[in-house]
Image (cartoon, helix red, strand yellow):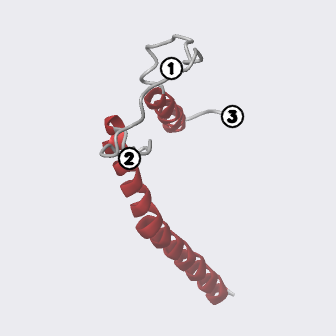
Amino acid sequence: MRWSSSRFVTLVGVVLLGLVSVAVAHGEDEDMSMDMGMGRPEITKPMDATVTAVPNTYFNYGEHTGLLLAHILLMTIGWVFVLPIGKKSLNFLKIHEFTKSLAQV
């Protein structure tokens, strides 16, 4: 089996795109300390009533907010527009080929 250059380029592109997700996910690994804060707990004074605790979520983490919103936007476009159009066109092609094969009989 001989590989054509376009198949090789496609395979290399797929592998590189797969590795991009790993590189983006592990971009902040400079701190390799093993300290997990397991020391003795310190007694602190109670929080003021004016300060409200904000839950820790992906949206509150400001460093990757743009990446998160871009992901949500692209996934919404893909599921709402691209997938139904592709599904309908695939069904149309199958029906068209079926009717063409019936006309040849």
Name the residue type under label 2.
Answer: Phe
Compare marks 2 and 1 and give the one earlier in the sequence: 1
**Marks 2 and 1, Cα distance to the nearest angstrom?**
30 Å
Q: Which quadrant of the figure has residue 104?
A: bottom right
Compare marks 3 and 1 and give the one earlier in the sequence: 3
Name the residue type under label 3.
Answer: Met
Image marks 2 and 3: residues in contact by CB distance under 8 Å: no
Name the residue type under label 1.
Answer: Glu
Under circle 2, the secondary element is loop
Residue wearing tag 1: 42
Compare marks 2 and 3 and give the one earlier in the sequence: 3
10 Å crowding of disc 1: few (<14), some (14-19), many (20+): few
Under circle 1, the secondary element is loop
* Mark in the foreground, 3 or 1: 1
At horizontal 39% and vertical 37% (from top left) the residue drawn is 47
Against 97, residue 99 (above or below) is below
Against 76, residue 58 (above or below) is above
* Mark in the foreground, 2 or 3: 2
At horizontal 61% and vertical 86% (from top left) the residue drawn is 99
Q: In the rendering, at what x and y percent does residue 48 appear?
A: 34, 40
| Quarter of the image where the C terminus is located | bottom right
At horizontal 57% and vertical 12% (from top left) the residue drawn is 34
Q: Which quadrant of the figure has residue 41?
A: top right
**Marks 2 and 3, Cα distance to the nearest angstrom?**
50 Å
Residue wearing tag 2: 59
| Quarter of the image where the N terminus is located | top right
Under circle 3, the secondary element is loop
Q: What is the number of callouts on the image?
A: 3
